[in-house]
Structure formats: structure tokens, C-alpha cells
Image: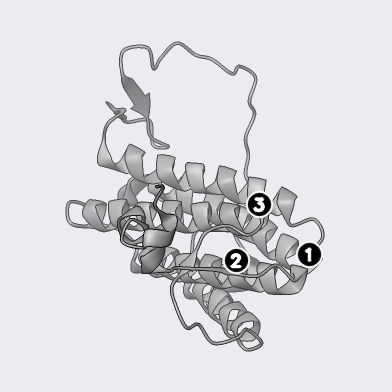
Amino acid sequence: MSNQEASGFGTPRISITRVYTRTGDAGQTGLAGGQRVPKHDLRIEAFGTVDELNSFIGLARDSASRLPELSAILLRVQHELFNLGAILATLPEDIHPKQARITAAETEQLEREIDAMNEGLPALRSFVLPGGSRLNAELHVCRTICRRAERILVELASHAAVDEASLKYLNRLSDALFVWSRWASHQMGVPEVLWDPNSASSQNSLNPQTQNG
């Protein structure tokens, strides 16, 4: 175990006294190291999407209040995503050794939770559609945002150094969100909505019983 793992990450020293600064009015924003970059910069897009994911997980956590086990997991994930966003907002050369980040431990914990919650779920016979409950739909929204964040991070990694642990984490988190959506529905006794290709309008139009006249 390294000294960093033994002692934990450093405590943030942040003082927010003003919400607006006017420094971003010209279409640029600042990284953690002070560098100014365009707001359409791929690194900004990456941690901005992670921030979007964090917000929607907060919404899902509120809907999961009747499932304290899941609610606690989602809160932990929010902290982890903030750590990830902070790392992405920092150029590799500016990252402090004590700065919080995603490690293999976070991904391994997700894998344990995926396996434990998936064990009691019925086998899937079709693809699942989002819905059936608000919480299920919100977790699917989180899953798709997580996939988008992963795609952006993969693109960023083709241009700049990106920690492999962060990529693995987002990949596993999207899998976890899928399993959690199924687990939540199962715990609440809500039937899953399964994909039926024959429910499309084009298929219904072929059935004379659905036509007027």
C-alpha cells in the first residue's frame, strides 16, 4: 500500500465568496491550474458531462429514498464523480500527489455491487426499455449520460493523457446503473418494460384489427 492509499487524499481547501466572476463572458474558462481554454475544449466537455451525470444521479438518489442501500451507493458515486471531474479539470502536470482521484478500488467496488445485485434478478429474455417507475427511468438517463461521458473521455485520451482508471470506472459505472435500474424495479415490485419490436406503428398497421373501417 502506498503512503497515499494509507493516509487518504488531502482535504479540499476551498473558499467560494463570489458566484459570478465575469471572466467567462468571452467564451473561455479556467482549468484548475489557471490555464484559460475555450469553453468548447474537449477537456471542458469531459468534466462538464461528468458534472451533468452527477446532477442526474442526485435526482435519482432523491427518488431512491425508499431504497436506502441504493441511495447510499448513489451518494458515494456522487463523491467519486466529483473527484473524477476535479482530476479532468486539471492538466496532468498540475495534479498534486494528494489530489483525490479515481483508482482501481472504486471500479472494484462497483463490480462487487453489480455482482451482488444482479444475482437475485430474473434472467433477461429481451432488451429492457427505460420506465415502469420514475427511479428506473432516471437511472437509465444516468446510464446514457455516463456512456456519453465515457465516449468523450475516450476521445480526449486520443489527444491528451487520461488516467486509464477513470475510463474503466465510467465503463463499469454505466453497467452498474443498468443493474441498479433493474434491481430497483425488482425491489419495488414494478414489472420491467421489455422491448417488443412488433409494437411499432408499422407492425400495428399490418394487423386488420387495429385499422378503422
Q: Is residue 99 in sight in this rendering? A: no
- The answer to whether residue 119 of the structure is visible from this angle is yes
Residue toward you, 170 or 56: 56
**Looking at the image, which residue is at 60% across and 71% down?**
182
Callout 1 environment at 10 Å: few (<14), some (14 to 19), or many (20+)? few
Mark toward the start of the polypeptide (3 vs 2): 3
Label 3 to label 1: alpha-carbon separation: 13 Å
User: In which image quadrant can residue 77 be found?
Assistant: bottom right
Picture layout, residue 6 above or below residue 123: above
Few, some or many C-alpha atoms within 10 Å of disc 3 (few <14, some 14-19, many ≥20)? Answer: some
Q: How many marks?
A: 3
Q: Amino acid at mark 1?
A: Leu
Q: Label 1 belongs to which residue?
A: 67
Q: Position of residue 205 (x, y in %)?
A: 33, 56
Cα separation between marks 3 and 2: 10 Å
Coordinates of residue 209 in the picture (x, y in percent): 43, 60
Residue marked by disc 3: 134
Residue shown at 49% from the left, 14% from the top: 21
